[in-house]
Amino acid sequence: MDTVEQLHDRLAARFPAAHVAVVTNPGPAAEHSLLLDPAHAHDIALFLRDDPALRLDYCSNVTGIDWPDKEITDTVKTSVPDPAGGPPKTVEQKTVHVQPGCLEAVYHLYSMALKHGPVIIRLRTANRTDRVALPSLTPVWRACDFQEREVYDLYGIVFERHPDLRRLLMWDEFKDHPMRKDYVEPDDYEWEPTAHGAILEKAKAHQSAASPVAGVADPGPTIKAPGSPSPATARPEARP
Amino acid sequence: MSDPQVSGLSPQVSVPGPTAFGQPGGPSVRQVRDPFHGDLLEVSMGPQHPSTHGVFRMVVTLDGELIVKLKPVFGYLHRNHEKIAENTTYLGSMPYTDRLDYLCSMSTNWAYALAVEKLAGQAVPDRAQYLRIIMAEMTRLVNHSCLVGFLFNDLGTSFTPLLYAFREREKFLDLFEALSGSRMMCNYQRFGGCRVDPSPAWLATARALVEGYPRFLDEYERMLTGNEIMLARTQGIGRLDGVHAVNAGLTGPVLRASGVGYDVRKVDGYGFYPRFDFRVPLGAHGDTYDRYMMRILEMRESVKILQQAFRDLPAGPIMDPKAKIRGFRPKPGEAYGRIESPKGELGFYLISDGSPNPYRYRVRPPSLINLTLLEEMCLGHTIADAVVILGSIDIVLGEVDR
């Protein structure tokens, strides 16, 4: 099988309009990947699946990754000659710029027919907030069906042309995307405006109207300390 | 059994895209309320249903007794395993991987250890490699025998075959408990080796158990394989052809029952599997009966692997001396490690940013992806068949919902 560089050259020759880049993996696994241009991803995926030398007929794994905005500090060192005539001084100049974040989908492809792989392809969204659409590869590999739904659910990547894009693991009414790095979970998942809550509110309003003490909405049950009856409720009792 | 190298695919076959209902090319379903033909019935099976193997739910639309539409619903056991693992150290997730596929914790541990070792470039000593194979194949015996028992439960035998399987399983679980301290949540593998070295007495017991296992299989098969009800209920039910199975990413015995010879043990040759002599059984029809036979034949192959492993088990250390337990921080990079778990291809995709926690931790769950074609397998069959088809796919909800 071709190396990633050879595959990159083949794709560049076949799809001259597409931007294909090699993403190197610095780790010991050294499985490099191809970053595809979302506009041509579907055509390239079809080519990867049907090309007789590749025949990547099996999409094993679809992963969503969140890359939040990153602040990068660049330090530029310049040597300034000392006007007093001493040795030149080194002055550090720091500039901070924000590297915009994105959401990424990673596909691990293998060939069951030719028994080789993996070829790893990556797709990146334009940003993390409003331009989060990527082309779905489910029409190419049905194996992406549930996995793309899961990525949509947990990361919020919208896969266009997916036949059935719904949440997979979270419930349909859920609002956020919990696998994002900046996700903050709600204080109480279980809270919901039930009839019980509404009735409680009504009772509070009723009690505040009827309460002899102004401003006390819900005095609640009075806790009596043993041996010390509260003055409001203390009454002389007839004892035998 | 045919040669594992022979693939069921021919290069001319073009794979159609997914055919969802309501889309051009897909099967059409008439309206649920149709006064002319009679109403369709929508049945919600699960999540609390004994035949769904946990909290799986499927919304089935029935025309009379035949299934015309089936939508699986997931998430009742979702606890965001991946997020929890991203917030803990690499080793801290090891016991948590036990809970993914809680019937096969040994092989799930191995898949995670394999991915981390690939990420960190960690070597594993020979004895540990053999021990891993022993544990993984024992797990396969346990899983497949129980699966067959559960499948027969779904067929209505009401526990008799399952109790035969549980009788054998207890012996293996006793061994796992003696070794790792826990019957099911073994937490046995470490990055660069295994946690405990088995004693000679343990090995002798395990070896005797494995030697006696074919007798149990013969007994099991005599009772089940030729059973008339079994044949009538499973042959030709839930057919799946190899091309669609490959395209839908099905793996494991479900894929091989459709005649596609793809076994990660053979293809990747991870661990020391290339040193072992075993064959990969293939089915011819892709129906429920073939999926049942795959399990039986794979158990026989696993026994062969175990016999070779006990014979060749070398002496030596079980942990690589360079392996780091504390302060383990792999260099930045990523790795995808996968094994042939009893359910299919179990993979872990890890991205390290050099910190003690993984930046991204992804589980490729075979149970979930094997359900992709459940609807296609069940269409046109009765709901009683759908239960059997689901049973033959072999899912564990701890892994499906994560």
Image: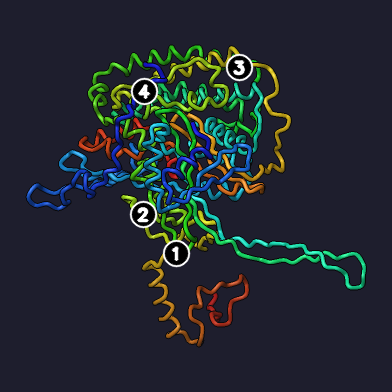
Labels 3 and 4 touching (C-beta < 8 A): no
Instruction: Bin the neighbour count of mark 4 within 10 Å (Cα to Cα): few under 14, some 14-19, many 20 and up.
Output: many
Tags 4 and 1 on a common chain: no
Tags 3 and 4 on a common chain: yes
Q: Which residue is mark 4?
A: B161
Labels 3 and 2 touching (C-beta < 8 A): no
Q: Chain of mark 4?
A: B
Q: Which residue is mark 2?
A: A160
Q: Which residue is mark 1?
A: A130
Labels 4 and 2 touching (C-beta < 8 A): no
Q: Chain of mark 1?
A: A
Mark 4 vs mark 2, CA separation in Å:
47 Å
Mark 3 vs mark 4, CA separation in Å:
28 Å
Residue A236 vertical position relative to residue B91 in the rendered view, above or below: below
Mark 1 vs mark 3, CA separation in Å:
59 Å
Kindly report which numbered mark, 3 or 4, lies closer to the viewer in this rendering: 3
Mark drawn on residue B252: none
